[in-house]
Image (tube, rainbow, N blue to C red):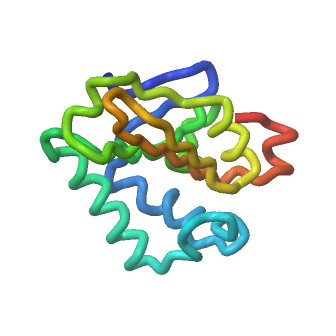
Amino acid sequence: MLPIRTTRLCLRDFVISDFDAVHAYASDADVTRFMFYGPRTEDETRHYLDRVIAAQTVTPRTLWELAMVRESDDRLIGACDLTFDRGGEADLIPLTYSKRQACAARQRSSGTCSRKAGGGRRISTLSRCAVTAEQSARDPI
């Protein structure tokens, strides 16, 4: 199932070697000002990365925190998260990257969406991106 590729993006699991790229955007106050966390310290970034990598091996997997990599230069530019409240929900819908999330990522703000899945269960998605508005206008993701 992973990686998921589009013409411009690749969504894949994080790896430990992503630390520098993740910390570059997660520690930037300008990038994180619209996110649910403020700038992260190196220890906070390490904890985050350890947590999402550990979640990759949990069965059933309920946290899909994926690295957003720009295909043109193989640069990690942000994260995309699909979280399921209960096990088994991942079987209900395919993992997708919506236009709404892409727009939010381009604006360096979090794009959140919550909707009902089968049986009244709620799923939430979140995307974050370190691309500035100026970069996006010049070089869309």
Q: Quadrant of the N terminus?
A: top left
- Residue drawn at x 28%, y 62% is 50
Please identify the quarter of the rendering in which residue 24 is found: bottom right
Q: In the picture, residue 70 is in which quadrant?
A: top right
Is residue 80 toward the left or the right of residue 33 in the image?
Answer: left
| Nearer to me, 66 or 125 | 125
Q: Where is residue 34 drawn, in percent x and y? A: 68, 65
Quarter residue 3 falls in: top left
> Is 31 located above or below residue 122 in the figure?
below
In the image, farthest residue toward the top = 7
The image quadrant where one finds the C terminus is top right
In this rendering, would 98 be left or right of 124?
right
Q: Look at the picture and state if 74 lies above or below 41.
A: above
Residue at 13 percent of width and 41 percent of height: 59
Residue 132 coordinates in the image, percent (x, y): 77, 53
Q: Position of residue 10 (x, y in %)?
A: 50, 30
User: Count of labels shown?
Assistant: 0
Q: Residue furthest left?
A: 59
The picture places residue 104, in percent across and down from the top left corner, at: 69, 46
Q: Is residue 35 above or below residue 55?
A: below
The residue located at (32%, 43%) in the rendering is 84
- Viewer-closest of 68 and 110: 110
Residue at 44 percent of width and 25 percent of height:
4
